[in-house]
Image (spheres, rainbow, N blue to C red):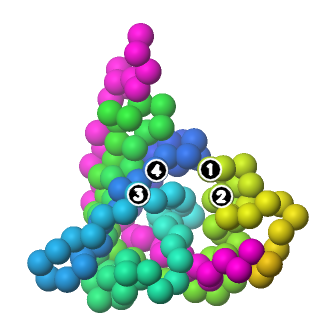
Amino acid sequence: MQLPDELKIAIDRNAFCAMATHLNMNEIQNHLMWIDYVGENLVINTEKGRQKTFNIRSDKNISLVIFEPQAMYSSWEIRGEVQEVIDDSTANNHIDRLSNRYTGHPYNRDNDVSWAEAQIKDREMWKIKINKLISMVRPQAKSDPE
């Protein structure tokens, strides 16, 4: 499924997403996450060994709601599945790029501090195939008061 241009623009402007995974058969776990895309796939980056990493290995289904940073009443609901887990140094490099985009500096450290010096845990990336996308874009909706 093709990502709408408006969604790509929102992600490029540091949109956040609420991500839901299945904790077990009866419970869903939710997280607020940074979001990225590569081609027509969405990308989540998370620390290895977190509960959500176990969740996604048990059930690859995932649900996201991505919010337009300039108009929080505009959003996209995505239902999909994690098609690939990338757990090599690519994921660590990716979180640095995301962190630079969202915060203006590498992940959890200053520019002159290495990954090893900061003792940051390794990361993994999830490439998400979109099965359903519901756009709730409301051009008139604004987060700032008029």
Identify the amino acid type marked 1: Tyr
Give yes or no for contact between labels 1 and 2 (Cβ–Cβ under 8 Å). Answer: yes
Q: CA distance from mark 4 to mark 3?
A: 7 Å
**Magenta range:** 118-146
Give yes or no for contact between labels 4 and 3 (Cβ–Cβ under 8 Å). Answer: yes
Q: CA distance from mark 2 to mark 4?
A: 13 Å
Q: CA distance from mark 2 to mark 3?
A: 15 Å
Front-lying residue, 125 or 32 = 32
Residue at the disc numbered 4:
16
x and y percent of residue 69 in the render?
48, 37
Residue at the disc numbered 3:
32
Q: Nearer the viewer, mark 4 or mark 3?
A: 3
Identify the amino acid type marked 2: Ser
Choose the circle earlier in sequence order: 4 or 1.
Answer: 4
Taking the magenta stretch, the answer to whether it contains residue 126 is yes
Q: CA distance from mark 1 to mark 3?
A: 14 Å
The residue that appears at 40% across and 15% down in the rendered structure is 145
x and y percent of residue 101 in the render?
67, 51
Residue at the disc numbered 2:
99
Front-lying residue, 106 or 36 = 106
The residue that appears at 32% across and 33% down in the rendered structure is 73
